[in-house]
Image: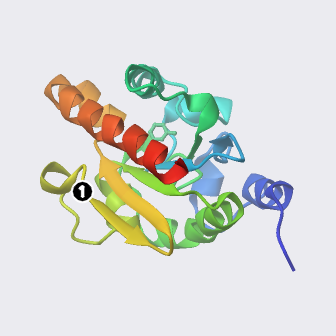
Amino acid sequence: MQYTWNDVERHVAACTLCPLSQTRCRPVMGRGNLQADIMLIAEAPGGQEDRQGIPFVGKSGELLDSLLRECGLDRKELYITNILKCHPPGNRDPKEEEKEACFPYLKYETFLLKPKIIVCLGRVAAQRIISPDFKITREHGSWICRKNCALTATYHPSAILRDPSKYEDAKRDFLEIAKKRTALNS
Ligand code: URA
């Protein structure tokens, strides 16, 4: 049977596959343009995202929006999601079993969207999606190709908030992402 976006959203909304379902306010399904050619994948919803049920609505979302804008990109033309759909208490790192339980939702999102470019935001996403030993400081901005999709990673907006000197590197990465999209669409 072929799942639709509505099916995935319904399953995420009712999910009890891991204990985070008992502590979350709301699960946070990915959001954005369902025709997007760029998919951003981050780690897990923060506290504000947990309360609103929308990815990147807090301070890191504001930073992400301005970074995108500076690079000629707009959240409205992208699809943004997380490895985990539920908020880990205290913003701790996702546990292995939580990532595994949640991964099928991300697979369905990727299957339905069929992005040309996947951008991992931060170490947790890059290590789950690109390679378990991915080093974000050394390897951000590098590209691999998998199943007709170009994959890269850059800093997580929260890491840039903690260390603003990372902003320029992330900006360079997003400028390359914008260029790659133009090249893939021409
Ligand atoms: N941090 C994340 O990794 N994802 C969000 O949706 C918000 C903050």
Residue at image position (18%, 59%) is 135
Pinpoint residue 60: horizontal percent, then vertical percent.
Answer: 41, 27
58 horizontally vs 175: left or right:
right
Q: Residue furthest bottom?
A: 1
Colour theme: rainbow
Pinpoint residue 92: horizontal percent, then vertical percent.
Answer: 36, 48
The correct choice, above or below, for 49 with respect to 42 in the image is: above
Residue under numbered circle 1: 142
148 horizontally vs 122: left or right:
right
Residue at image position (67%, 57%) is 113
Q: Residue furthest front?
A: 186
Pinpoint residue 1: horizontal percent, then vertical percent.
Answer: 87, 80
Residue at image position (48%, 48%) is 44
Give 102 or 42, whichever is nearer the viewer. Answer: 42
Can residue 174 be seen here? The reply is yes
Residue 126 lies in what quarter of the image? bottom left
Neighbor class of circle 1 (other Cα within 10 Å; few <14, some 14-19, many 20+) is few
